[in-house]
Image (spheres, rainbow, N blue to C red):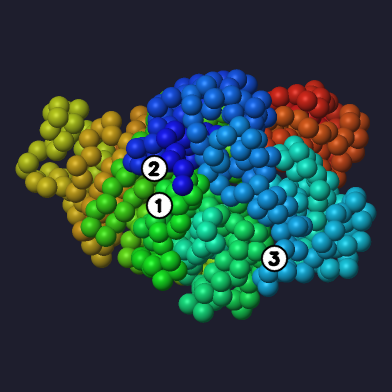
């Protein structure tokens, strides 16, 4: 067995910080590498040593094997952990490390090669007795060949890149026309992301669940599975929320899936941590999807329900140690949820966002009673989210004894997550957690498309939740007024005092009477004789972004942003602006004209910072609604921009290869 003394992580961001944490606990020295864009990144600060490798894009930096090896030699690192993405599933990487005498903390090159190619892996899985989805096992030559195969399989079909993962190079086609465009986009994305444009096609399972099995194997022939993760909440094939265990599986199905995952792992002599992904239909029939020969983004939920540090196990296996666990030692305890916090704007069709984190204060990583909160992150306040890498900011996890309790804990943690400076999906994640269908566990990979067909809106809460916003705004206004009248004394007076105010939300007035008590406020809706008073207490002070308020004994957290006449409040998946006015000012506000936004319908605007990779029309062309006009690449994903209505292209001020900012004009119509 080897003794590993210094580990270099060939990655960045939160996964590098995550590996460093375990290495530090084990007494192993650590080395970070960083691109020019990451010179001030958090993972650099978390390592014992760091090495600059130049460049800003992944291709210029983290994907350069020779630079990684040079960094190892410079620092004396005797092992490399690849994290996920980048070089983690490139078989040539461990080969070159081995030639340089450096230990790779991951599986063998042969296993990576076999499972990294979706066509090969599907053949191997079938030979190992693993259930597979009907599809075409050969290489698709072109769009016409793809359409012929799809016609034979039957629609819908999934068009997928043979190499890579992470949702890139994947398209669903429901008819022959969509096959042609899907093939072209998938091949293009696969080429730019993985340097491999091979495509294959398989039957798309309707109402599918995405459930994966975590496996762990050593170099002595031992292999176990550590339960499953439900990863069905996805958008564009990218996972958004994961949980463990799955609310859908029974013990018999779990065992069958686990045993097939182990059989496949043994068939390719797998060692280290890995994940076998399955598609599961409504009748619990499951089919092999792919095997990820690396640590998964969502590995924390498995760690939370098993108590197993997967990074530690990977290090031990790489050092030649046998597994310290057997299958009977694996016990699933409680429930864990993971929310992926992305720099993307749900209100702009989830388009990527870049910028500086002017405020970034995650909820405390802590254990309180039955609640565990964990936040894996690679950024800090002041960090920059750039256009060069994946837009994930953090992974927020919660654990509790039951699924319902873990969800409630996640709702609370999301409401307390302070983040400002970039567009983000915090409120969207919270909305999913509150969703009745999600809480009932009725999940499919189409959940987001089905429940948010017109996009995400967070401005129309149900009546009971709206009332919670109203009374909170009224109380915080009283605290604010009292603070500035009497300094640090947050209450106006210890004596009973009542004020009549109007809380104005979305041009609707809600009159309330606020009575200051010794310990909080009594709030009553004016003009509603049968309405029961609300008792609200809070320790919030002006300037704090999170207000914890207790309303009739129930405690909730609100994000608070002060404005001249009120507040913008974020809570439970909703974002509302609430003005708190006197009765006279509310009357006058009702007379004000509503500002009408400028009509920009004659322009096609760039929806995100990105690169123009295709222009499908030219000046003078007539276009129809739904017609593809341009393709913008941002954060390794290609986004097809379509015409919203028919018209004629009047001006085309950009060219292929131009780099644009948000809302720059791509084309103008007559």
Q: Earlier in the sequence, mark 1 or mark 3?
A: 3
Q: Residue 670: horizontal and vertical position, in percent?
A: 83, 31
Residue receiving disc 2: 22
Could you say whether the residue bearing mark 2 is in a helix, strand or loop? helix
Measured Cα–Cα span from mark 1 to mark 3? 28 Å
Which class describes the residues within 10 Å of circle 3: few (<14), some (14-19), or many (20+)?
Answer: many
Relative height, residue 113 to residue 246 (above, below): above
Residue receiving disc 3: 125
Q: In which image quadrant can residue 497 be found?
A: top left
Residue receiving disc 1: 309
Frontmost residue, 66 versus 639: 66
Q: Is residue 383 left or right of residue 90?
A: left
Q: Residue 414: horizontal and vertical position, in percent?
A: 39, 48
Tally the numbered discs: 3
Task: Please tell me which residue is depicted at 33% across the width and 41% down the height of the picture.
Answer: 25
Q: Are marks 1 and 2 in contact (CB under 8 Å)?
A: yes
Frontmost residue, 524 versus 72: 72
Q: Residue 606: horizontal and vertical position, in percent?
A: 69, 32
Relative height, residue 521 to residue 669 (above, below): below
Could you say whether the residue bearing mark 3 is in a helix, strand or loop? helix
Task: Please tell me which residue is depicted at 26% across the width and 38% down the height of the picture.
Answer: 477
Q: Earlier in the sequence, mark 3 or mark 2?
A: 2
């Amino acid at each position: 067995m080897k003794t590993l003394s210094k580990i270099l992580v060939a990655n960045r961001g939160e996964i590098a910080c995550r590996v460093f944490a375990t290495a530090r606990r084990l007494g192993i020295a650590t080395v970070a590498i960083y691109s020019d864009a990451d010179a001030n990144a958090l993972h650099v600060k978390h390592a014992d040593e760091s090495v600059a490798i130049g460049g800003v894009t992944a291709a210029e930096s983290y994907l350069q094997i020779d630079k990684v090896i040079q960094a190892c030699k410079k620092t004396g690192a005797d092992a490399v952990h690849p994290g996920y993405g980048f070089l983690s599933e490139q078989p040539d990487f461990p080969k070159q490390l081995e030639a340089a005498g450096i230990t790779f903390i991951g599986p063998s090159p042969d296993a990576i090669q076999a499972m990294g190619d979706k066509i090969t892996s599907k053949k191997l899985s079938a030979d190992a007795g693993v259930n597979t989805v009907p599809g075409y096992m050969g290489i698709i030559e072109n769009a016409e060949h793809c359409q012929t195969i799809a016609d034979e399989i039957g629609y819908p079909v999934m068009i997928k890149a043979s190499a890579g993962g992470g949702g890139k190079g994947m398209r669903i086609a429901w008819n022959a026309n969509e096959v042609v465009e899907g093939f072209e986009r998938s091949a293009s994305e696969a080429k730019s992301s993985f340097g491999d444009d091979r495509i294959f096609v398989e039957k798309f399972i309707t109402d599918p669940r995405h459930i994966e099995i975590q496996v762990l194997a050593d170099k002595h022939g031992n292999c176990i599975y550590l339960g499953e993760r439900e990863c069905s909440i996805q958008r564009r094939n990218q996972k958004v929320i994961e949980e463990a265990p799955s609310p859908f599986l029974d013990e018999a199905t779990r065992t069958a899936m686990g045993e097939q995952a182990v059989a496949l792992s043994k068939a390719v002599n797998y060692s280290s941590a890995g994940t076998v992904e399955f598609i599961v239909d409504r009748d619990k029939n499951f089919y092999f999807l792919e095997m990820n020969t690396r640590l998964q983004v969502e590995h924390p939920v498995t760690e939370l329900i098993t108590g197993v540090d997967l990074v530690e196990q990977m290090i031990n296996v790489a050092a030649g140690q046998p597994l310290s666990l057997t299958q009977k030692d694996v016990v699933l305890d409680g429930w864990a949820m993971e929310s992926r916090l992305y720099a993307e704007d749900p209100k702009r069709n989830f388009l990527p966002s870049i910028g500086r984190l002017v405020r970034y204060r995650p909820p405390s990583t802590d254990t309180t009673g039955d609640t565990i909160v964990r936040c894996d992150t690679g950024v800090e306040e002041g960090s920059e989210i750039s256009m060069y890498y994946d837009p994930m900011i953090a992974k927020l996890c919660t654990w509790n004894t039951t699924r319902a309790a873990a969800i409630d804990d996640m709702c609370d943690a999301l409401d307390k997550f302070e983040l400002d400076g970039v567009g983000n999906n915090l409120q969207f994640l919270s909305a999913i957690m509150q969703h009745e269908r999600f809480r009932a566990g009725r999940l499919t990979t189409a959940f987001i498309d089905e429940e948010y067909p017109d996009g995400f809106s967070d401005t129309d809460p149900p009546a009971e939740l709206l009332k919670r916003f109203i009374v909170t705004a009224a109380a915080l206004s009283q605290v604010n007024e009292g603070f500035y009248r009497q300094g640090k004394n947050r209450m106006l007076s210890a004596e009973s005092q009542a004020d009549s105010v109007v809380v104005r939300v979305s041009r609707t007035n809600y009159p309330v009477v606020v009575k200051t008590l010794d310990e909080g406020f009594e709030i009553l809706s004016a003009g509603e004789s049968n309405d029961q008073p609300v008792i609200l207490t809070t320790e919030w002070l002006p300037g704090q972004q999170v207000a914890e308020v207790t309303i009739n004994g129930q405690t909730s957290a609100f994000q608070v942003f002060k404005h001249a006449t009120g507040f913008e409040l974020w809570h439970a998946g909703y974002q509302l602006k609430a003005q708190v006015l006197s009765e006279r000012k509310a009357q006058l506000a009702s007379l004000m004209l509503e500002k009408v936004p400028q009509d920009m319908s004659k322009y096609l605007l760039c929806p995100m910072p990105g690169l123009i990779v295709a222009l499908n029309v030219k000046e003078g062309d007539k276009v129809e609604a739904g017609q593809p006009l341009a393709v913008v690449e941002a954060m390794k994903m290609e986004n097809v921009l379509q015409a919203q209505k028919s018209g004629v292209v009047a001006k085309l001020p950009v060219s292929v290869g131009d780099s644009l900012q948000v809302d720059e004009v791509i084309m103008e119509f007559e």
